[in-house]
Image: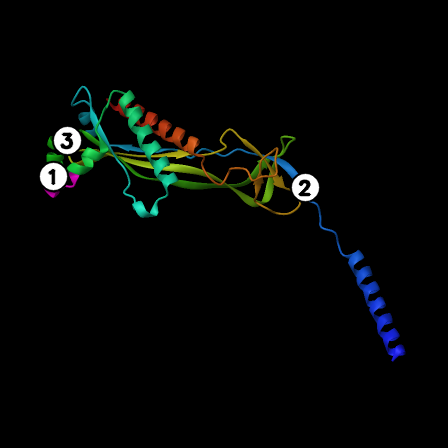
Amino acid sequence: MKKVQLHLIGITVVAIGILGVIGSKAPKPIPIEYTQATFALQPKQDEIFTKPLLAKTLNSAENISVVLRVPASEEDKITEAQKLINNTIYSTIEKEFAKANYIVRDRAMFAKVLEDDNVSADYAKIHNSTKTDLILELVSYGDIKHNTNKFTDKNGIEQTANVNFAFTGTSAEFKLISVKDNDLVGSYTFYYTPCTLGCTYRINATRASNKLYAIDTDRDAPYEYVAPDVLENFFKECSVRLIKELEAIK
């Protein structure tokens, strides 16, 4: 019995030794190396369409009245944070038109008028009831992905990666309706493209990865979304560009 126990102990010791040798020869994980990469994206061009009738509408009065119509949203499916962002966007648009001497009608009051079936089906009645010349409808807005595998390294040399890096921009589509004429007189799509002047990040040079990291920390860089302040500024620029388009038509 003693011999059997000694034999088993010997086998165990040998097995532990073998495992120790195998473990010592296991490959060590390759440390991650980062390299600096600067990305410069080409801006997406705005899409603008207007009808000659718009000039007639704009010249029909000294001060043109406009109301902003916004996308309908299901209140139970929208977060409080998104409501706050939306309200900021709508307020920004209205403020820019007011600054440009447009008469900005109250959205809530306009919506109440449209609730009347006898009025909502007749744009002439809408014009008489609200004294509104133009409806500026924000048809939609949302994120757009911009992909590239081109970047410039820290030595200023252009490189091509094995993966695509995605950056988030946004777009906003407006349409302009002449209330009195019941006609679509303008359509405008504006784009925000990030990194048009160049954005510098760190990328994983050890393996093919499309993750981007802030240049001075290990945390993820904010490239997957459009920050609220950037979004607000984008809609301010959209409004200014749209107003300039209208002024050029007069």
Q: Quadrant of the C terminus?
A: top left
Q: Which amino acid does label 1 sit on?
A: Val
Q: Upstream in the sequence, badge 3 or badge 2?
A: 2
- Classify residue 205 by image quadrant: top right
Which residue occupies the foreground of this view, 153 or 229?
Answer: 229
Range of magenta residues: 114-120
Question: Percent from the top left, x then y, of residue 162?
Answer: 59, 46
Q: Residue furthest front?
A: 2
Task: Tell me the CA gap for discs 2 and 1.
Answer: 66 Å
Q: Upstream in the sequence, badge 1 or badge 3?
A: 1
- Left or right of residue 196: residue 236: left
Q: Mark 2 points at which residue?
A: 33
The rendered magenta stretch, by its main secondary structure, is classed as helix
Q: Which amino acid does label 2 sit on?
A: Glu
Q: Magenta includes 225? A: no
Q: Which residue is drawn at 85% across and 67% down?
A: 13
Q: Residue at x 20, y 21 (%)?
A: 63
Question: Percent from the top left, x then y, of residue 240?
Answer: 33, 25
- Classify residue 132 by image quadrant: top left
Residue 130 is marked as: 3
Q: Is mark 3 on a helix, strand or loop?
A: helix
Which residue occupies the foreground of this view, 162 or 136?
Answer: 136
Q: Is residue 243 above or below residue 185?
A: above
Q: Tags 3 and 2 in contact by the CB under 8 Å rule?
A: no
Residue 245 shows in this picture: no
Task: Tell me the CA gap for discs 3 and 2.
Answer: 64 Å
Mark 3, residues whose alpha carbon is within 10 Å: few (<14), some, or many (≥20)?
A: some
Q: Is mark 1 on a helix, strand or loop?
A: helix
Q: Name the residue under label 1.
A: 119
